[in-house]
Amino acid sequence: MLAGSYDSIMIPVLSRFKLVSGRLRGLRLIHTHPKGDKLDHDDMADLALLRLDSVTACTMNNKGYPLFLDTAYILPPENDASQSEFGYLEDSDPYNQKTDYPLFIEALDDEIQRKTKQMHISKDGEYAVLTGVFKSKEECDINLDELEELVRSAGVNIIARVPQVKKEIHPKYVAGPGKLREAVIKALMTGAEYIIFDNSLSPSQSRAVSEFTELKILDRTQLILDIFARRAKSNEGKIRVELAQLKYILPRLGAKDDSLSRLTGGIGGRGPGETKLEIDKRRINDRIAFLNDKLKKAEQARDIQRARREKNSIPVVSIIGYTNAGKSTLLNSLTKSDVYADNLLFATLDTSSKRIRFPKERDVIVTDTVGFIRDLPANLAGAFKSTLEELHNADMFLHVVDISDKHFKKHIKSVEKVLEEMDLQEKERIIVFNKIDKLIDEKLDEIRKEYSDAVYISAFKRASFDDMLNKIGYYFFKEGIEGFND
Ligand SMILES: Nc1nc2c(ncn2[C@@H]2O[C@H](COP(=O)(O)OP(=O)(O)OP(=O)(O)O)[C@@H](O)[C@H]2O)c(=O)[nH]1
Ligand SMILES: [Mg+2]
């Protein structure tokens, strides 16, 4: 029971009635409209955003007796977007209600659950609605395609995109409140647990959006962190990821415990360490200090290792390139080894080094690296400095490019930008166009004309490596690879 003023009531946080995706809240709102209007825009917003079982406005006559009941409820989701989202009860006489309410809602809830499940292609896993604000339609498509790959790599399914093309971002909510509301409703309607922003959310935006909805909110940085957290294998890699996660969370800690648990949860609760609800800033700071200390020790160990390798003066070739270009696959076929490669972004997070032997027993060390990505969030760029710093020790880069990706030119640019930022642009470099098996001949010829210096391979087929190996051989030993594959 809530008492409001003449023209509004405040609905408190409904944490006692947990929101379960693809279901109704188990709560109906019946309230008076002293002014005599029927259900208005705000009522419908509450119905959708709070996912109430139903909302009823009761108008009254001038003596204060109930006159008319106007009741709306959420309809089960339809694949047809033009379908209405709400239904209305005919039952409007306050003194003669005919609806068996519990029965009606139970049936509706079942139907919503059934229809929501039908919309989910895969039975397992969680679903996300993607959103973001983009300067142009083109930027929107490219970024959302990539975000979709990232989300998929994090093991989450995508149910819808609700983007906004607009020059300016909304200072508080990033997307305009109307757009955010649309995304939230879409998520609730489709049983999605997440709303994922392509934009980076500042701490205050992150808090504002988390207060707007009970759904889990992630931005691109968090998503990448989450993927990193899953994949990091080495001691140092794990420390760096956890540090980046903690530093990300710290300024976002709000007053509300509830949003805190959602912020720190990450996907499937893979937040940093064992930190859950009870974390506070002090404990996070303690943990950061502890990890920094551990990191220093790990770095010292690595420097010793590296110094040892440098003494050997064996040429080092580093395989670099955009994420998912096929770097690890190439390393595997090149060195007949078994480094983890998968059709996921950031499959590789720790560098691995392998040797290949050129004729006359000359060795070359080949290293695999973490994939590049555009606008790597600043705190992450730092986190992976160690991985990329090894690039300074390389004598040559193989810049692997997935030419079957329609955005491959953009990927080349992103990689070159990172090289420039790291002052590595002068290093010897071979552009290796990979996945030629996925292209038709005409398209391949076209690209060959444009990039005549590049070599063309399929990382699956060693037979396609001759050109590349010859180039490497000539660069280091002034000699090709005649007899290399014998
Ligand atoms: N068709 C085709 N697929 C390839 C080729 N090379 C790699 N792939 C596939 O591309 C996907 C990515 O390969 P990875 O080797 O993991 O890519 P990566 O560059 O190491 O990716 P990250 O470590 O995530 O940055 C895998 O599914 C590979 O099987 C190729 O020549 N042809
Ligand atoms: Mg890899």
Image (spheres, helix red, strand yellow):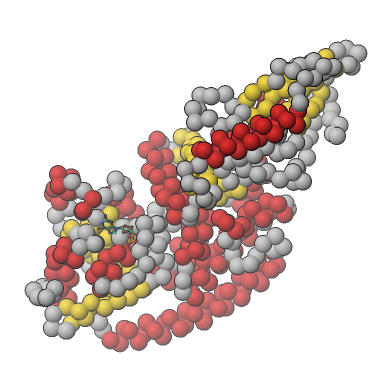
> 83 or 382, which is in the foreground?
83
Above-or-below relation of 41 to 205: above
Q: Which of the 4 quarters of the picture holds residue 458?
A: bottom left
**What residue is rendered at 61% in x and 33% in y?**
111
Residue 166 in view (yes/no): yes
Residue 197 in view (yes/no): no
User: The C terminus lies in which quarter of the figure?
Assistant: bottom left
Above-or-below relation of 402 to 360: above
Above-or-below relation of 350 to 109: below
**What residue is rendered at 39% in x and 65% in y?**
348
Query: How many marks can you see?
Result: 0
Residue furthest right in the image: 63
Q: Position of residue 439 (x, y in %)?
A: 21, 48
Q: Which of the 4 quarters of the picture holds residue 213?
A: top right
Residue furthest top in the image: 62
**What residue is rendered at 48% in x and 54% in y?**
155
Above-or-below relation of 214 to 54: below
Q: Position of residue 438 (x, y in %)?
A: 23, 50
User: The N terminus lies in which quarter of the figure?
Assistant: top right
Q: Is residue 242 left or right of residue 100?
A: left
> 150 or 23, which is in the foreground?
23
**What residue is rendered at 13% in x and 83% in y?**
360
Q: Is residue 398 left or right of residue 485?
A: right
Q: Is residue 223 left or right of residue 139?
A: right
Q: Position of residue 91 (x, y in %)?
A: 74, 18
> 108 or 374, which is in the foreground?
108
Q: Position of residue 364 (x, y in %)?
A: 23, 78
Q: Which of the 4 quarters of the picture holds residue 279?
A: bottom right
Residue furthest left in the image: 482
